[in-house]
Image (tube, grey):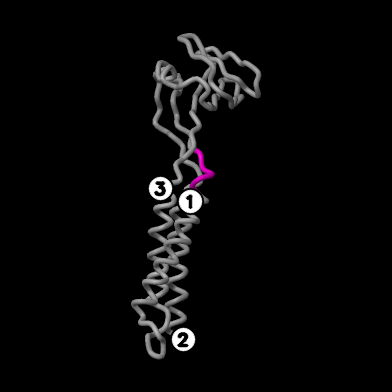
Amino acid sequence: MFVQRKSLLVSFVLVASLLLSSMTLAQVGTVPNHDWSELSSVTSGSKLIVKVKNGRTLEGKLTSVSDIGLSLAVSSQPVDLKREDVLSVYQITKKSSKKATLVGLGVGAAAGAALGAAGGDSNGFFISRGQFAAGLAVLGGGVGALTGFLVGRNGSKRVLIYEARQP
């Protein structure tokens, strides 16, 4: 009996560590792009974070881009920035909850199956150990998918669009 509880606890700890390690809080694009013309492909109204050489960081919606600078609407106020003053530009997009939901489904189903297989024996039960493991896999998959969806739907990612060359 003690060995079964210990294996159940070990299975639970392993599954919890898998769940925690697979969660990502933010995804940041880090590949430097020194081509200002990439900004022209960004649609007007997109959310941007612009770091300026004086140390300020502006977050707003893109209104226009030209060869000499860009214009943002920051808190409904227009802000014009010269190209030579801009250090970096990131676009903020919503992450899809699809990947997080599928990861949660897989991890939850595996966790449920592992817990079901580790928990108890089939003597005296009205169902077998395999049926118990399958039932817990389905239940764990549902809980994992729901958790993954809730975690994934609130995420956003920053994608680096432009970064000025450093002298």
Q: Is residue 162 above or below residue 4?
A: above
The image shows residue 160 at horizontal and vertical percentages of 45, 29
Task: Report how far apart the C-alphas of labels 1 and 2 lie in the structure.
Answer: 36 Å
Q: Report the front residue among 140 and 107.
A: 140
- Image mark for residue 2: 2
> What residue is rendered at 40% in x and 85% in y?
126
Q: Amino acid at mark 1?
A: Phe
Q: Is residue 14 above or below residue 71?
A: below
Regarding mark 2 in the picture, which secondary structure is present there?
helix
Disc 1 crowd, CA 10 A, few/some/many (<14, 14-19, 20+): many
Task: Report how far apart the C-alphas of labels 3 and 2 lie in the structure.
Answer: 38 Å
Question: Bounds of the magenta span?
Answer: 152-156
Q: Amino acid at mark 3?
A: Lys
Q: Is residue 91 above or below residue 153?
A: above
Task: Report how far apart the C-alphas of labels 1 and 3 lie in the structure.
Answer: 9 Å
Disc 2 crowd, CA 10 A, few/some/many (<14, 14-19, 20+): few
Report the residue that reaches farthest toward the bottom. Answer: 124
CB under 8 Å between discs 1 and 2: no
Q: Is residue 94 above or below residue 98?
A: above
The image shows residue 79 at horizontal and vertical percentages of 61, 16
First in sequence: mark 1 vs mark 2 = 2
Q: Nearer the viewer, mark 3 or mark 2?
A: 3
Q: Quadrant of the N terminus?
A: bottom left
Disc 3 crowd, CA 10 A, few/some/many (<14, 14-19, 20+): some
Q: Amino acid at mark 2?
A: Phe
Q: Nearer the viewer, mark 1 or mark 2?
A: 1
Regarding mark 1 in the picture, which secondary structure is present there?
helix
The residue singled out by tag 1 in the image is: 149
> What residue is rendered at 47% in x and 75% in y?
9
The residue singled out by tag 3 in the image is: 99
